[in-house]
Image (tube, grey):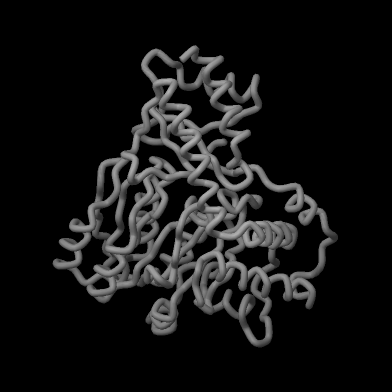
Amino acid sequence: MGPGPSDVHPRVLTAMSRPLVGHLDPEFVQIMDEIKEMAKLTFCTRNELTFVVSAPGSAGMETTMVNLLEPGDEAIICIHGVFGNRMADIAERCGARVIRVEAPWGQPIDPQMISKALATSKPKLVSIVHAETSTGVLQPLEEISGMVHAGGALFVVDAVTSYTGTELLVDEWGIDAIYSGTQKCLSAPPGLSPVSFSTRAVEVLNNRQHKVQSWFLDLSLVKDYWAGAKRTYHHTAPVSALYALHEAYRLVLEEGLENRWARHRQNHILLRDGLQTMGFEFLVDEPYRLPMLNAVKVPAGIDDVKVRTILLNDYNIEIGGGLGQFAGNVWRIGIMGESCTPTHVNTLLSALKEITNL
């Protein structure tokens, strides 16, 4: 019940145990095609360039940046936690001039700050974290998307924690590039990153003046493996991990996206009410709280590490500690995918009562 990885369904574990086939075997290519279609459905997009990077969510982040940015470009990077800072670092490594728009940790980005930044720059892209895993903030996106497109820029979104756990509408919200991870609300093993690129983003990619700085993440090469008329060898795909993701996607679609979003919301409310009854306070104001990643203040007099150690060793429950400026002061409680059940929530609440006597 930390910030990931989440529990996985037995069907996903079974899928991982299937015999290996070659990464260009016709049977495996069919699985890849089905994964692409299920990725489109779960991103709520028709983008043709939708596939899965053979590396975790941070590689998805890097894929968007290194393919869309070239030396000398301007990029507005929104920072309200650890992962916004990481995006800025990658953008600078691409040779871009980064314009930072920042909010205090635990608060969302104010769209008017982005509007001001757009008025004084000509960025190629604006990038923002939808679900900031380090703070538990859910960032509204629709207003920002309109501003970005009016300014002639691409809109790039980090959805590592929000994907399949809360409403996320790529086409409707005008998102040009998006990436996620498999180990959170998808409840698949870590190590893969679903991504999607709009036609506008693909046009930028096709008109690059410089080679992409990463060979492995260069979409002009990778896309021919995932989407070419004749599949071109690029790398040896993680076959077992993709078996697992294929089954995890099937479970998501069997449940239904809207039902899955509602389940995460309902169990968040169950957790919220139980914690507040015990006197716990949330870090984030209610309208901006992530349902699947709950940032809770550690009460005065409670030893952060001691409680988390007892939870792990005596109750077999893992929750996350705070990152950066919140280290020692915040718990990050995940209810994601297969870990998002009333049983998980009630077991944690009972354990915390016993340990803390709150």
Taking the spot 68% from the left edge, 77% from the top edge, the residue there is: 233
Quarter of the image for residue 120 reads bottom left
Up/down of 101 relative to 175, above or below: above
Taking the spot 19% from the left edge, 56% from the top edge, the residue there is: 113
Q: Is residue 69 left or right of residue 36?
A: left
Quarter of the image for residue 237 reads bottom right
Taking the spot 58% from the left edge, 42% from the top edge, the residue there is: 340
Do we see residue 288 in this rendering? yes
Q: Position of residue 67 (x, y in %)?
A: 44, 71
Q: Quadrant of the N terminus?
A: top right
Q: Position of residue 89 (x, y in %)?
A: 36, 54
Observer-nearest of 326 and 211? 326
Q: Position of residue 53 (x, y in %)?
A: 58, 64
Q: Position of residue 4 (x, y in %)?
A: 56, 43
Up/down of 169 relative to 219, above or below: above
Do we see residue 328 in this rendering? no
Which residue sits furthest right? 19
Taking the spot 38% from the left edge, 35% from the top edge, the residue there is: 324
- Total residue callouts: 0
Quarter of the image for residue 247 reads bottom right
Q: Is residue 160 left or right of residue 283?
A: right
Observer-nearest of 112 and 67? 112
